[in-house]
């Protein structure tokens, strides 16, 4: 099904829009106007009071047109009446941003039944009830109860069971992740998780789908399976049945913030295998990463003779015991130019080795050995190998420039080596399953073109 009527409507009415700052009815109107919505916007409230310059009327049937979308933000009983009024006016899509329905039990169940029965009778599509709303950054449209900032649109979309986590992404942006759409399904009495995932699977503005689920149902698993056959789906589920989502084709993470980590890797360079090379300045920092490889499905790569020769001759000190991990410490002197050159030579040799799929850059940088990461890693970043930086210890006064350089090169970075290995491992396992599915024809042809 298409959700365009909800996410990019030509005209909208907010029923319950309020001129009182701090009210949810005020905030929704403010979000829509402040993001620069390009369609026509109306407000309906009892007194017909304009809100933030948006024209208002006391009833829906007094508007100059029938809006494509209605947004209801009223107490529960009044919300039902508002929905029936929208239905009588032939509004075809309605977001019920009101609570007090089936999630509350008792009378709320009956309220939701009335809404759903009328919606089916008149073929109206309903989001919610008890949804905090939606955001489409690409269309500059944000019918959401809480503040939404004017973020740049990206290629990641989020579907959530939690209203708090979903709406939080309207005002908080994980570093390195830009969103296209945020969708809280609420009670999902009509439009549900399966509908949303099907839509996002075909949405050209969405390259990665993130899902936060509190419980699994058949429609959730079906939606994930269909979407994952087209593009990557990253799922975080507190249910002990999360393995069902992995079986359906999702990348499953064990911590909420790891969803965003996985998205950054997917939008960078997807691993083509599980063979890892590691560059770092000390056995201690390196061992934090290497000790976790095997349990996460990764393995240290056996380098080619050519790569070994380059690293031994141009990177390693005479005391270095191995070529992978590449422990370049100590340099001949505490000098950023020398340390940067060692990184450049090593990473270029590693990404050029057919036996290496992933390179971890373990960075411990004090001011005396800081170097230009853009210069050191630019050539390697142009290759198709997965690069992941881990900022184990980076002095505060140079951290900002290091992170800026990594973002320019589209190299995902982490502060925690174990977390980096865990997330990369999950993505690598998913990628291996994906390539096998493409070869056997299980995945769609679109999936073959999603990434490098």
Image (cartoon, rainbow, N blue to C red):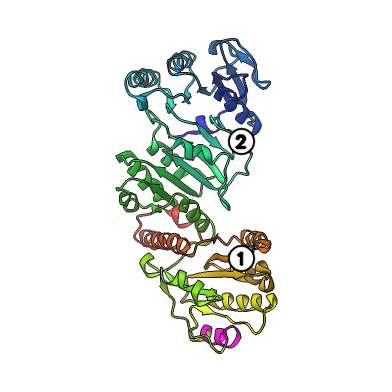
Image position of 199 with respect to 105: above or below: below
Q: Which residue is mark 2?
A: 140
- Image quadrant holding the N terminus, namely top left
**N-terminal of the two: label 1 or label 2?**
2
Image position of 190 with respect to 208: above or below: above
Of the pair 407 and 171, the residue shown nearer to us: 171
Q: Residue at x 55, y 37 (%)?
A: 136
Side of 124 where 239 appears, left or right: left
Q: Which residue is mark 1?
A: 394
- Give the foreground label among 1 and 2: 1
Q: Position of residue 441 (x, y in %)?
A: 35, 57
Q: Position of residue 446 (x, y in %)?
A: 45, 52
Image position of 267 with respect to 54: above or below: below
Q: Position of residue 365 (x, y in %)?
A: 62, 69
Q: Characterize the local packing of mark 2: few (<14), some (14-19) or many (20 or more) Cα atoms within 10 angstroms.
A: many
Q: Which residues are magenta?
A: 307-317
Task: Give the prevailing secondary structure in the magenta stretch.
Answer: helix
Image position of 63 with respect to 165: above or below: above
Of the pair 16 and 350, the residue shown nearer to us: 16
Q: Which of the 4 quarters of the picture holds residue 402? A: bottom right
């Amino acid at each position: 099904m298409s959700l365009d009527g909800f996410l990019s409507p030509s005209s909208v009415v907010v029923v319950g829009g309020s001129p009182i700052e701090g009210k949810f009815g005020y905030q929704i109107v403010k979000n829509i106007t402040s993001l620069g919505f390009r369609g026509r916007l109306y407000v309906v409230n009892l007194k017909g009071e304009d809100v933030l310059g948006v024209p208002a009327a006391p009833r829906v049937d007094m508007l100059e047109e029938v809006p494509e979308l209605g947004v209801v933000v009223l107490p529960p009983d009044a919300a039902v009446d508002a929905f029936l009024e929208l239905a009588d006016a032939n509004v075809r899509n309605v977001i019920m941003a009101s609570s007090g329905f089936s999630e509350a039990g008792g009378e709320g169940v009956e309220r939701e039944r009335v809404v759903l029965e009328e919606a089916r009778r008149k073929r109206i599509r309903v989001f919610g009830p008890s949804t905090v709303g939606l955001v489409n950054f690409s269309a500059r449209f944000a019918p959401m109860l809480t503040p939404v900032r004017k973020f740049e649109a990206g290629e990641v979309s989020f579907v959530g069971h939690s209203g708090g986590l979903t709406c939080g992404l309207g005002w908080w942006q994980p570093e390195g992740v830009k969103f296209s759409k945020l969708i809280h399904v609420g009670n999902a009495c009509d439009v549900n998780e399966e509908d949303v995932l099907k839509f996002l699977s075909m949405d050209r503005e969405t390259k990665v789908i993130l899902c936060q689920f509190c419980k699994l149902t058949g429609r959730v698993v079906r939606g994930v399976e269909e979407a994952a056959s087209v593009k990557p789906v990253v799922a975080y589920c507190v249910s002990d049945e999360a393995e069902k989502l992995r079986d359906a084709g999702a990348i499953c993470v064990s911590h909420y913030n790891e969803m965003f980590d996985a998205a950054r890797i997917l939008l960078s360079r997807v691993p083509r295998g599980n063979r890892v090379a590691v560059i770092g300045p000390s056995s201690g920092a390196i061992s934090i990463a290497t000790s976790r490889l095997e349990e996460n499905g990764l393995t240290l790569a056996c380098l080619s003779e050519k790569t070994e020769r380059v690293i031994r001759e141009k990177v390693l000190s005479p005391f270095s015991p191995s070529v992978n991990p590449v422990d370049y410490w100590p340099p001949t002197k505490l000098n950023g130019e020398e340390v940067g050159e060692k990184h450049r030579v090593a990473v270029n040799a590693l990404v050029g080795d057919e036996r290496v799929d992933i390179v971890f850059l373990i960075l411990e940088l004090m001011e005396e050995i800081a170097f230009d990461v853009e210069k050191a890693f630019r050539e390697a970043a142009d290759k198709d190998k997965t690069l992941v930086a881990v900022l184990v210890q980076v002095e505060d006064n140079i951290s900002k420039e290091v992170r800026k350089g990594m973002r320019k090169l589209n190299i995902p970075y982490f502060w925690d080596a174990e977390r980096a290995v865990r997330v990369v491992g999950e993505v690598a396992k998913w990628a291996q399953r994906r390539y096998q599915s493409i070869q056997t024809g299980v995945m769609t042809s679109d999936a073959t073109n999603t990434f490098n």
